Image (spheres, rainbow, N blue to C red):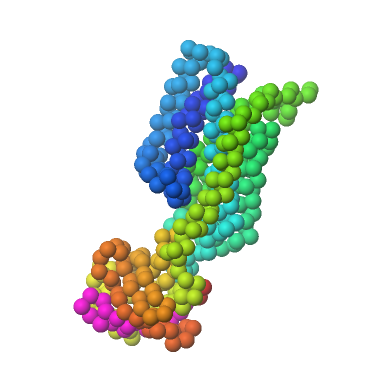
Amino acid sequence: MAGTLAITRRALAIALILLMPPVLFAYLGEQGIPGFEWASLARIGWPYSLWAGAALGVIGATAWSALLRDRADDRLHAWADLIVRRTLTLVFLSYGLSKLFRLQFYEPYFHWQETPAGDLSGFELTWYFFGASFPYSIFIGLGEILAALLLLSRRTSNIGALLLMMVGGNILAVNIAYRVGVAHFAGLMLAGAVYILLCDAARLIAFFFGSGATPPRAEPQPSELRRAIVLVTAILALLLPIADKVRDVPRGLPVTMALTGAWRIAADSATASGLANEIDSTLEWQRIAFEKNFGGNQVVVWTRDSLVRGRFQADTVARTLRIHLRDAREAPAFEGTWQLRNDSVAVLRGVAGPDSVTLRLRRSRTP
């Protein structure tokens, strides 16, 4: 039993040492942190690198057990503990703070609200559910923040890992059940929490199932390097949500933009053939939504049998509007002006390809 546990701990330690640094760099890169723009999960071959790291962990642990046995175990686990706890702290503290700032579970998009639940993807349905209640997002975020803070200290890391297993286990289950797309990332974070508990497995078993006193753990003296890493981890975790917010603001949709919301296009609108050709359909536009997402200003157009996303540019002073569908580098699907007759009715006049068009809109969803 003890030998199997030792090999399992070594395998996890080697795999996590190999995997967590590049995954952390990718996470920083995808959050827009300067200096890490080169990094992404796609560039490190995710998720194939996860299986490669797991295989190397098993091979490395087997070779370690055969050649070194228990020698140098302390150094291996010291490095693994440092990397795992700091990575988990950084990731979950930033995720928790992003929920408090409503950067992750944002208000449901207007086009989600206009789409029947059965037609939403697993990701859209999940984000709709979590984003619909800000207090629930705060509750989840506070749980992640508490677990991350407990991991900062070795003395409270077991409590943090237990809490993280509940939080991370739920995240992994949601990713798998609803096919959100980051199950491998969530699984790696959960494996980190399992590793922390395995390092203290003997003491935890004695505490919960033993009859005597639990033996104390030998605590290494904190070095200046460890203190510096703790400080850098805390600073990065605080900066990540701020960087995400700042990155989004310049491209954000003005809150005073009158067209924000979902609209139905009147059946008697003069819709030109150019609009239909732009979305590869002979049908007319039926509904349109103007909204904000993390890529900027998003427009969504419905026909009878399709839904197409794109980008738009709107001037709230000159009241001009340009809509690009699919590729912003192509000619605009619509370019012209907009006029708000009242809070519920708007008119778009302009050109689509070679044709002049007039679209009369009636609001169906308000901000």
Q: At which x and y percent is residue 122?
A: 46, 55
Q: At which x and y percent is residue 288?
A: 39, 73
Query: Is residue 71 left or right of 207 when viewed as pictured?
Result: left
Image position of 94 with respect to 202: above or below:
below
Q: At which x and y percent is residue 26?
A: 43, 43
Query: Is residue 294 left or right of 304 when viewed as pictured?
Result: right
Could you tell me how many numbered marks the image carries? 0
Q: Is residue 170 visible?
A: no
Name the residue: 38% across, 39% down: 44
Q: Main secondary structure of the magenta part?
A: strand
Name the residue: 53% across, 53% down: 241
Residue extending furthest toward the left:
354
Image position of 206 with respect to 66: above or below:
below
Q: Is residue 186 visible?
A: yes
Task: Examine the image and state in which quarter residue 298 appears.
Answer: bottom left
Name the residue: 78% across, 24% down: 213
Q: Quadrant of the N terminus?
A: top right
Name the residue: 40% across, 35% down: 49
Q: At which x and y percent is residue 240?
A: 52, 50
Task: Examine the image and state in which quarter residue 262 appears.
Answer: bottom left
Image position of 366 with respect to 185: above or below:
below
Residue 321: within the magenta?
no
Task: Examine the image and state in which quarter residue 115 appears.
Answer: bottom left
Stretch in magenta: 349-365
Residue extending furthest toward the bottom:
341
Q: For this rendering, which residue is in front, 119 or 280?
A: 280
Q: For this rendering, which residue is in front, 48 or 154?
A: 154
Residue extending furthest toward the front:
224
